[in-house]
Amino acid sequence: MDDLRIDALFDAAKKARANAYAPYSGFAVGAAVLSESGAVFAGCNVENAAFPVGFCAEAGAVAAMVAAGGKRVAAALVLGGGETLCMPCGACRQRLREFGDEATPVIVAGQQGVRRRFSLGELLPESFGPDALGRADG
């Protein structure tokens, strides 16, 4: 993946992270996905007093892509704060798998830039995806 696309994902995730609603954890997260068309879609975490009702940044980015007609995640970037890597949770790994495949790049970033790169297959090995259900586009 070229640096211009990574920069676009990083910038979109950073802007989204600035709008995160995280009054309970204080842990703001931004995410961005690159669709098959090259468009970038971003999302941020949104917490809720009834904790299970909130949602992750990756979920917001994927939903924005789908709402705009996107069908495939070509790459994803997750941006968090702190010293530890802000990794996608298990549910978000599965969300990304629905629209990506084992080779889909997942980039984990901090405020200073890219920290690590993974393939979705590394993060969700032997995953269950649309292809398991016989979908032609899976």
Image (cartoon, helix red, strand yellow):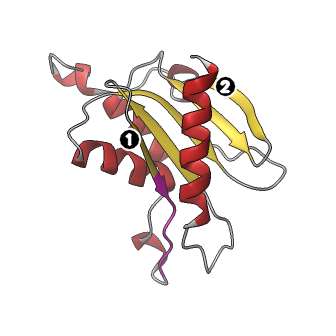
> Does residue 129 sit above or below 29 in this rendering?
above
**Image x and y of residue 22, in percent:** 59, 73
Left or right: 74 with respect to 37?
right
Q: Is residue 89 visible?
A: no
User: Residue type at mark 1?
Assistant: Arg
Residue 135 painted magenta: no
Q: Position of residue 72 (x, y in %)?
A: 31, 28
- Residue under label 1, please give it: 95
Residue placed most toward the observer, 19 or 136: 19
Q: Which amino acid does the dot numbered 2 rest on?
A: Arg
Question: The magenta stretch spans which residues?
Answer: 43-48
Quadrant location of the N terminus in the rendered image: top right
Q: Residues within 10 Å of mark 1 (few under 14, many from 20)?
A: some
At mark 2, the secondary structure is strand
Disc 2 marks which residue?
117
The tag earlier along the polypeptide, 2 or 1, is 1
> Could you tell me residue 78's position as x and y percent?
59, 43
